[in-house]
Image (cartoon, helix red, strand yellow):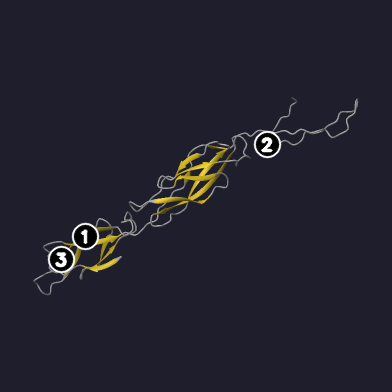
Amino acid sequence: PVQASVPDLTDADTGDTYTYSTVSDPSEGSISWINSSTGLYEFAPGIDDFQDLYLNQQEEVSFTYKTTDQNGIESVNNGQIDITVTGDNDPPIVQSGSIGSDVFEDAPIPVQGSIQGTIEVDSGDTYTYSTESDPSEGTITWIDNGEAGTYEFAPGNDFQDLSEGQTRTVFFTFKATDSYEEVSNLGQINIVVTGQNDDTTVASGSIDLDVFEDGVPVQASVPDLTDADTGDTYTYSTV
């Protein structure tokens, strides 16, 4: 808060005493009288007011006041005090969310998303998005890292271990930097990837046991197959 005194008043009567009081408050900020007998007051911009001001932008507010003397007589006019408030830079505030679209393993075309809900407190300020941490699988590319905040997610060759319908959630974190290099909090985007069935590859081989005409049956197992999907089950059949 800033303290100041109102200008000297004019009164032909010598020896009068006065009490100062507010007639109308400023549109933003607040006024309190530190000493209502001498006209010493305090102006507090507050936490929530003037937040729309960008760096060095100014806004003028005012309050009016009056005096009442010891006889209960009020001043014939109201005085006005003008206060100029200069803005400081406020960092943008980003929100977490999700990509908002279905994403599948082996998707041939990357899935696009956009950052939603970013708050730039200072009016007229601009900001740029950047990745803070990449997803553990897949890749993120910014299409427009300006205020549009559009990006794309490509699963690539990751997520091959997912069986059909199985899901896995990955995420990336991001931040916004405004035109005065003020950095936001970190936001997080969650991405749910759904698995698709991968082909099974069987191997050829030989029984690797002695087999004799008219001999007893011989048991053996086929070679291990190859399947990227974990947890799949199989039924073998003769072709």
22 or 157, which lies in front? 157
Q: Which mark is residue 227?
A: 2
**Separation of disc 3 and disc 2 at Cα?**
91 Å
Q: How many marks?
A: 3
Q: Which mark is residue 63?
A: 1
Give the farthest residue toward the bottom.
15
Q: Are marks 1 and 2 in contact (CB under 8 Å)?
A: no
Q: Are marks 1 and 3 in contact (CB under 8 Å)?
A: no
Looking at the image, which residue is at 50% across and 39% down? 111
Looking at the image, which residue is at 21% across and 60% down? 63
Residue 167: give x, y in percent of width and height. 58, 39
Asked if 9 appears above or below 92 in the picture, the reply is below
Residue 174: give x, y in percent of width and height. 48, 50
- Residue at image mark 3: 68
- First in residue order: circle 1 vs circle 3: 1
**Separation of disc 1 and disc 3 at Cα?**
17 Å
Asked if 223 appears above or below 24 in the picture, the reply is above
The mark lying in front, picked from 1 and 3, is 1
